[in-house]
Image (cartoon, rainbow, N blue to C red):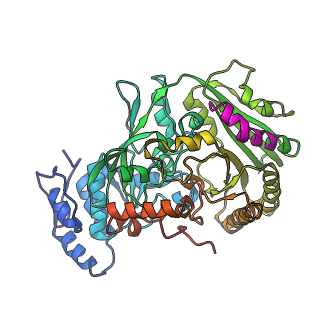
Amino acid sequence: MLFRSWWPVPALIVSASAISAGSPHSYPVQVLREKGIASDRLDEISLGLRHGDGCFCSLACDTLAGLFGSDGVNTPGQDAYDAARARFWSQQQSLETKPSCFFYPANAEEVSIAILVSRATQCAFAAKGGGHTAFKGASNSHGGITIEFIHMKQVVPSIDRKSVAIGPGNTWVDVYTTLDSFNLTMAGGRAATVGVSGLILGGGISFFSGLRGWACDNIISYEVVLASGEIVTVDSNTHADLFWALRGGGGGNLGIVTHFVANSFEQGPMWGGFLTWEMYGSKDALIDGLIDYAEKGSLEDPKAALIVSFAYAQVYQMWVSSVMVEYVDPHAPGSHPKVFDAFFNVENAFQDTTRTASHSNLTLEIAGTTPPGLRQSYWTLTTRVDKQLSLDLMTIFEEETKPVMQLTGMVYPLIFQVITVSQQRAMMRNGGNALGLGGGEEPLLLLNIAPMWVLSSDDTLALTACSNFISRARALARERGLDHPFLYMNYASQFQDVLSSYGQENKARLQDISKKYDPEGVFQTLSHGYFKFEGAPVEWR
């Protein structure tokens, strides 16, 4: 049965033959009729809209509610609507973004209907997986339809244990908790509460990336709902161009992914955790360790994963340094992998949480460092590996942090990661991905600043500090010939032009593929908020 419930709405008729899939049409009401959904009111409004007469989100939400009932749609004034808003990670998405309705599809066919209703009424829409993007409207459609996948959370390993089918509503702890029970895992996100869909479609760095590449490089197939309402299976042989585009190109320009099949592999307990120091007595040694890992350690031992962070911590009233060290194999208490010797040799750590644990347990620890319910912003930059540049970027970071370090609840970290040579080589598998990094033969430093604070009245100060750091850091790297264009989508702010950073050729190829599968530009005009081809979602003032 296609529809979970039904009650009358004005001029809406649902026929008993509502199970046939529609073929692509430029006229969405016609496709809805082919699916057994007929509405004179939709037809009249859609004809008017083709002549430029506004949008009708109330009708869109009423239509969906009539088809799918309260289990499928929530609107303002309902407790479930307020609960849905609260499920977003950042205040900007949960408090400042108010859709006309939340829609909770159970399968791809219901997503298809939502897109067609959106087109018929010209009501904007957004798709939410885990809701972990920081900026307003990124995965929550203000005044429109927010499609949330809370009824699409399957995690099903294959009989041969070599793949796993995943629904788009999962967070990574959902996936890993299920796979842990089979002694399996996959190359996916490192923070428990991050959503599967956004991380994979933006690239996706994993604990296992040294061995297996990024998450997007480990996807076998996608189920995708196109702007036409068509549902297609995409892999390296079928719709191979779209397969390439979805690997790092994001979903917001191409379709809505309703099912992933990913490579899985055997994995028992692993080792990892955090080491933390006072910053001024440790930063030089940690930068040394970071550079050595980038140039040597990551090549010699691809089982390792590393994040190096620096921040002013109000709770301690001090600057702190922290490293996250993770390793594929377990280690006995009191021991550590040799690749991390440089970090364990730094004296006076006041915290050491390293231990052998399950994959899911290690991701819960990381999620604890980025709690929900705060103002959030992510910004990113990539440079070539250079010790002096890294130290000088630390100086800029400290200078730009000082004006905001005492804002209420402010935590302002600068985070260094390495895009290793082995990761870049893995990006060439199965036709490559869209990121523009594949086949690189030098490691890169991936920088992320990720402040969190409490008061919206402090937004301008916080975002100005971020913008100043990124501008100064990019200028210094460029002056020294150490800049790199790549911007990691999953760390980018609304003020950054991600898709252009993939290179002119890759961006043009993405645009061609988008036009092929969405010739009317539905995902450019009705799916607002995330990264589009015309540039940054928001212009920095």
Residue 501 vs residue 176, the one in the foreground: 501
Q: Is residue 201 left or right of residue 27?
A: right
Q: Quadrant of the C terminus?
A: bottom right
Q: Position of residue 129 (x, y in %)?
A: 45, 49
Residue at image point 22% right, 60% down: 24
Q: Is residue 291 magenta?
A: yes
Q: Quadrant of the N terminus?
A: top left
Identify the residue shown where x is 57% and y is 38%: 209
Can the viewer see residue 417?
A: yes
Q: Is residue 525 left or right of residue 116?
A: right
* 201 vs 459: above or below: above
Q: Residue at x 37, y 24 (%)?
A: 160
Which residue is painted at 27% across and 63% down in the image? 117
Which secondary structure dominates the residues rendered in magenta? helix
In-front residue for pair 222/323: 222
Residue 415 sits inside the magenta stretch = no
Percent across and percent down for residue 95 are 53, 60
Asked if residue 145 can be seen in this view, the reply is no
Residue 372 point in image, percent of width and height: 59, 49
* Snapshot quadrant of residue 383: bottom right
Residue sitting at the far right: 281
Left-right relation of 359 to 281: left
Which residue appears farthest toward the left when viewing the image?
A: 16
Relative to 436, is 325 above or below? above
Q: Specify start and end residues of the magenta stretch as a single range.
A: 287-303
